[in-house]
Image (cartoon, helix red, strand yellow):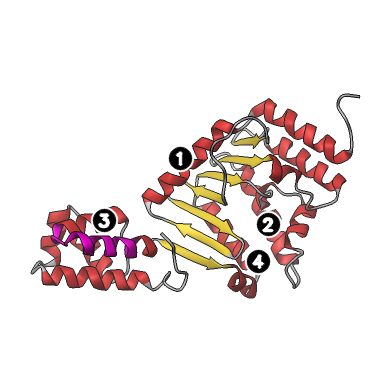
Amino acid sequence: MALDPQELGQSNSDLAAILQELRKRAGLSGVQLARRVNMSQSKISKIETGKVTPSLVDVELILRALGAPTELMAQVTVLARIANTEWQDARALRRKGLDKKQVELATLEQNSTEFRYFLPTMITGLLATPEYIRASLAPFPGDHSKAIARKLDRQAVLYDSTKRFTFILTEQACLWPLVPEQAMAMQLDRLASVSLLPNVRLGVIPMAGHMPWAPLNVFTIYDASLATVEVSTGALVFRDPRDIQEYLGEFRTFEGYSLWGESARVKLREWADRHRGISRDL
C-alpha cells in the first residue's frame, strides 16, 4: 500500500469520525459496543474522539461488531493503517533544527528498554565517532554544533545496564568512506570496542555467500512497540503491532546472516586494516 504523506496526520480524526458514525448507524451506544468488543467504554470514547489511535486489530473488532460490509471494512482498515503511521519530513526537521530531533530521540531512548538497529548504509549516531558525526551532518547547511553535542551526549545510554541493544551493520555501512581512511579505521575500532559492552550485541554482515533476502532501508525497533524506517526524504514511524512484527521478522532474518562476538570483531579489525592500508597476509 502506498502511503500519501499528505494523508498522514489527518487520518486519525477521519477514522474517529467514521467509527463513531458507523456505531450510531448500527443503533448501538458506546457502552453496548464496548461490551461486544471486550473494551472499556472509556477506550471506545477516546477512539471516537481521536484521543486514542486504535490498532488495526481494534478497528477490525469494532467493524465486525458493527456488521460492516467487506468493502467498507477494507476501506476503513486502510485508513487505520495510515492513522498508525507517522511521516517525519526531513526538510521540516532541518528547518526546526537538527538538535531538536536529538532531544526527541533521547526521550525515546530514555523511555525504551530494548533496541534493535538495522544499518545497511552507514553507522548510526550512537556508535559514531565525533568526526563521523560531523561528516554525516556536513551536507546540510547551518551550524550543527548543538546537534553534534547532543548526538554525543546520547551515547551515554549505551552504558545503561538496564537497556539492551542489538546492532546489525552490513559491510557497506562499515566500508563506505564517509570520512578519510584513518578516521574510518578509528570508527571501526570504536565498533569493536562497543561490541564488548555486556548489554550490546553487534553483528556484521559480510558481502559473501548466499543471502536471498535483500535489505531496503535503515530501520530501528523500540521495545517491539514502535519502528522507525528511514528514507532519503524523511522517516516513517509505525506503531501498529502487525507492522512491528514484520520488521521483527526481517531483523531476525538479518541476524541469521550476521557474524557476532569475536567473529564480528575479527571482521571489523580486517576492515579497519583495509582502511589503514594494512594487509594481514604480510
The answer to which of marks 3 and 1 sits earlier in the sequence is 3
Q: Residue at x 17, y 54 (%)?
A: 37
Instruction: Tell me if label 4 and label 1 are in contact, CB under 8 Å.
Output: no
First-in-chain label (2 vs 3): 3
> What residue does disc 2 label?
151
Q: Amino acid at mark 4?
A: Asp
Residue 178 in the image: state x and y as whole percent: 78, 53
Could you tell me the amino acid type at mark 1?
Gly
Q: Residues within 10 Å of mark 2 (few under 14, many from 20)?
A: many
The span from disc 2 to disc 4 (Cα, nearest Å) is 8 Å
| Nearer mark to the viewer, of 1 and 2 | 1
Cα distance in 3D space between marks 2 and 3: 37 Å
Q: Secondary structure at mark 4?
A: helix
Q: Residue at x 53, y 66 (%)?
A: 88
Coordinates of residue 171 in the picture (x, y in percent): 70, 40
* Disc on the earlier residue, 4 or 1: 4
Element type at marker 3?
helix
Question: In which quadrant of the rendered image does the N terminus lie?
Answer: bottom left
The disc, 3 or 4, on the residue closer to the chain's N-terminal end is: 3
Instruction: Work out which quarter of the rendered image holds the C terminus and state it.
Output: top right
- Disc 3 crowd rating (10 Å Cα; few below 14, some 14-19, many 20+) is some
